[in-house]
Amino acid sequence: MTDSIMSKAATMEIPINSNGDTGTLPEDDSLEQAANLQWSLDEQDLQQVMVSGPNLNETSIVSGGYGGTAEGIISTSSIKGPAVRYNAEFNKRISVEGIGSNMHHSSSSSSSMTAEEASRGVAVEKIETVKKWGLNTYKCTKQMISERFGRGSRTVDLELEAQIEVLRDTKKKYENVLRLARALTNHFYNMVQTQHALGDTFADLSQKSPELRDEFGYNAETQKLLCKNGETLLGAVNFFVSSINTLVNKTMEDSLMTIKMYEGARLEFDAYRSDLEELSLGPKDAVAMARIDAAQQQYQVQKDKYERLRSDVIIKLKFLEENKVKVMHKQLLLFHNAISAYFAGNQQQLEQTLKQFNIKLRPPGADKPSWLEEQ
């Protein structure tokens, strides 16, 4: 658009006189306006090129019209102004941002690669764990089925197996004792509550029946005394039940958990032992020898685990037997003395029995929450 206007302004028609000489028009308005428009457009183009041009040092501006001389060519390298400084700062900022973006991209890519490698390592570790678990489960299941159908051999410790069976039978019998003792406690508690209510009723009737005041009074005192002795006996029986419960559900159960772990280790040991025996009967090439060496290592690991748990079971059974005898000796003596003193009506001996075994009775209503706790 600028070139067309410039050419149009340069080739405008100039009037010629009759002698062929050009006329002098110093005040030609149309020519002056075209020249001013040309210079304004040239200045706008110059500013636009300064701002958006890729390299101002290689740009030249032609200010003359059509057929202008070389004197009209102006080199922009000689122009010093805000546009040149702005262009330099702009190029510098573009280059810095480009370098920063490249560095950020490289750092983010390296961090993503590190995270990917870490996640890949975790996945591989989980796969290896599942693989080992599946192989171990397969071997143990195979050994269990072989033992059940009588095709495989198993490691047996006759003395230890007999002690384990005795413990399981003893636990069943002690659980029955615990169940019956709890039933006795519940029935006796209900009887004591009934005696307490009956004594209160007799005392109330003794106040309202003058003709039977003495008789109701005697019975009221007797029921109160029985109720007091019954509460003392309940304290002894509750202590007996608590001790038996601890022996059965904690001490014996802990030993049985160790026995369960020992039996699992025995099954794994026999499974790997059978696997090693099968490999030993096979060919003896390089691949088979490598598998035999790996099976030998696994066999040794399972053997050490089995022997360690076997030793733990023997020690626990020994201490369990000693603890059982000590606890039951004390609890059976307590139960006998308390029951005998209660049914003999010997209140003093009953109280002495509780002091002998350091049993403290709770006051009536201690099990019930206070009115503050109920809120």
Image (spheres, rainbow, N blue to C red):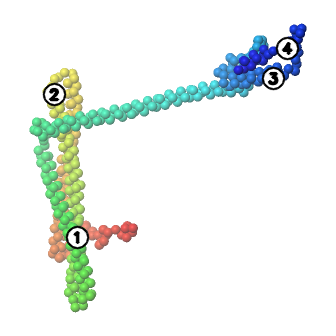
Mark 3, residue position: 33
In terms of sequence position, does the residue under pointer 4 or pointer 1 come before the other?
4
Q: Residue at 25% across / 67% down in the picture?
A: 359
In terms of sequence position, does the residue under pointer 3 or pointer 1 come before the other?
3
Mark number, residue 374: none
Mark 2, residue position: 280
Q: Can residue 302 be seen?
A: no
In terms of sequence position, does the residue under pointer 2 or pointer 4 come before the other?
4
SS of the residue under disc 4 = loop
Q: Are marks 2 and 4 in contact (CB under 8 Å)?
A: no
- Give percent across and percent down for residue 194: 22, 75
Quadrant in which the C terminus is drawn: bottom left
Residue in the foreground of this view, choosing between 328 and 48 = 48
Residue in the foreground of this view, choosing between 96 and 306 = 96
Would you say 98 lies left or right of 69 here?
A: left
Q: Nearer the viewer, mark 4 or mark 1?
A: 4
> In the image, what residue type sits under mark 3?
Gln
Mark 1, residue position: 189
> In the image, what residue type sits under mark 4?
Pro
> In the image, what residue type sits under mark 1?
Tyr
Query: Where is 268 relative to 334, above or below?
Result: above
Would you say 81 lies left or right of 327 here?
A: right
SS of the residue under disc 1 = helix
In terms of sequence position, does the residue under pointer 3 or pointer 4 come before the other?
4
Mark 4, residue position: 15
